[in-house]
Amino acid sequence: MKTSLKAAAALSLSLVASGAVAAERTVMVGGAAMYPSKTIVDNAVNSKDHTTLVAAVQAAGLVDTLKGAGPFTVFAPTNAAFAKLPAGTVDNLVKPENKETLTTVLTYHVVPGRMTAKDVAKAIKAGGGKATLTTVQGGTLTASMMGNKIMLTDAKGGMSHVTQGDVLQSNGVIHVVDTVLMP
């Protein structure tokens, strides 16, 4: 028995040392730890800064999609970002009769694939200062740098800044943004 415990302990130590088993590196978003082993939705529901986004994703019926394999790059507006919209906009969008419009707005915040901040910055550099990102919705976002921050310009000319990048998920990555992007 002692030999098997020693062997198990040695195996555990060697796995940890080799990186095969490592503690998850979490980041805090909205007061909650975001776990790289969880999906975008499983993490987002715990962020107090993203309750409006989570409610919108639920109203649009996108929960299963964003819990899927992906990978997805999500530019996730905070509650404060949604609060910048004209009064009543969010309440109107989450009504069942506006599900299609809500889905259009939400999927405009999602780019297929996993693009870290480094990937976006590299694309901006390769594009001579701008990168065009095609969203799941089918529209485009223009990414550029504003100092050391990534800035996104939407189809209507609105601008949003990535305030927290590289929140890694099992099925993609989240970049927190300060303004809702409009297709």
Image: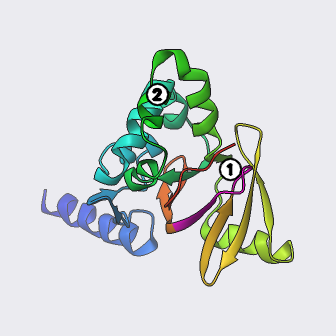
State whether residue 13 is above or below residue 136.
below
For mark 1, give the secondary structure. Answer: loop
Residue type at numbered disc 2: Asn
Farthest left residue?
2
Residue type at numbered disc 1: Gly
For mark 2, give the secondary structure. Answer: helix
Q: In whole angstroms, how far apart are the C-alphas of marks 2 and 1?
A: 30 Å
Residue on which the image places disc 2: 92
Q: Is the residue under label 1 in contact with that under label 2 (CB below 8 Å)?
A: no
Q: Quarter-wise, where is residue 149 in the image?
A: bottom right
Bounds of the magenta segment? 154-162
Quarter of the image where the C terminus is located? top right
Residue on which the image places disc 1: 113
Quarter of the image where the N terminus is located? bottom left
85 displayed left or right of 3: right
Q: Residue drawn at (61%, 50%), measured in percent from left and top?
A: 181
Is 28 inside the magenta-drawn segment? Answer: no
Q: Residue drawn at (38%, 34%), measured in percent from left and top?
A: 55
x then y, percent, for residue 18:
45, 72
In-front residue for pair 179/36: 179
Label located before the other in sequence (2 or 1) = 2
In-front residue for pair 160/14: 160
